[in-house]
Image (cartoon, rainbow, N blue to C red):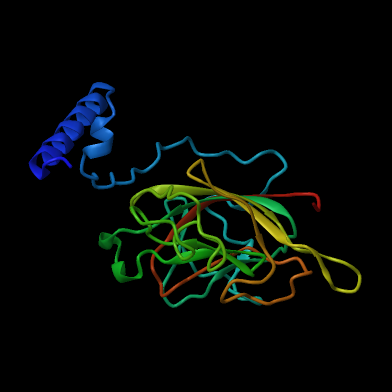
Amino acid sequence: MSHPVTRQRSAVWVWATTTSVIMGLGIGNRLFARPADKPPRQAPTASAPTSAPANAIILFDGKDESKWTEGGHKPLRWKVQDGAMIVTPGTGDAITKDKFTDFRLHMDFYVPTAADGLADRHGNSGVYLQGRYEIQIIDSYGHEPESHQCGALYSIAPPRVNACKPPGHWQSFDITFHAPKFDAQGKMTRKGRVTILQNGVKILEEAEFDHVTPGPTDEHLAQPGPIRLQNYGGAPVRFRNIWLVPLKDG
């Protein structure tokens, strides 16, 4: 039987030798280094504004709000300034007069800073596809992706990455939307799908859904529906360069 001191010295020699080999292989730092703090998420590089293709329906050109209402036949009362529609306190949601089924939608949006007022709302807004499925807009810069953060299909599918810029910067959504499909008896034969690029970064890809998100205009899932921009407490979120290309059913 070996002496306890001898066993201890042997163990120390084995540990030291093994450590030297590991360091010599260049992997020691990765094995023994203390976990570093996560680096802050950086805003993606700004991309050039996306121009509408020739076959696009222009929903907002920087001046004309005539394709929008506040519901029913009420004219939209949002402020238009510097080429943007601005959510205005005391008004309703902005809702397109036209209704759509499958489409590609582009928009630029601006989440306000504290200097813009109502900072406690964190720039909260959203774009409802067909008036039923909300894509969240909110100040999510630096947050973990969750189903209530910016770019999420609200309460259903979180963005797979955080592609947000800090508040006070223009951002963009490019949304490809396919509505749920139904047979003649009203049975759903295919779930809806949505793919989203935020600031050119793919944050959702073919995310499926078979029910509305909270606060829908209606639940007539088999029918076309409008684009709806949310006024959540009057936070002055801005929108510009809004256009849509209808897609064939698919």
Outermost residue toward the left in this view: 5
Residue 106 x %, y %: 58, 49
Name the residue at the top extreme.
24
Query: Residue visible at 75% across and 63% down?
Result: 180
- In the rendered image, residue 89, in percent from the top left (x then y), is placed at 41, 74
| Left or right of residue 65, residue 43 in this image | left
Identify the residue shown where x is 41% and y is 72%: 234
- Looking at the picture, tell me which residue is in the foreground, 201 or 161: 161
Q: Residue at x 41, y 50 (%)?
A: 164
In the image: residue 240, left or right of residue 128: left
Q: Quadrant of residue 192?
A: bottom right
x%, y% of residue 98? 71, 63
Number of marks in the rendered image: 0
Which of 58/104 is in front? Answer: 104
| Relative to 180, residue 11 above or below | above
Is 141 drawn above or below residue 227 in the view shown? above
Q: Quadrant of residue 88?
A: bottom left
Give me the residue at 38% from left, 64% from top: 123
Q: Position of residue 7 (x, y in %)?
A: 15, 40
Q: Residue furthest front?
A: 1
- Occupied quadrant, residue 116: bottom left
The quadrant of the picture occupied by the N terminus is top left
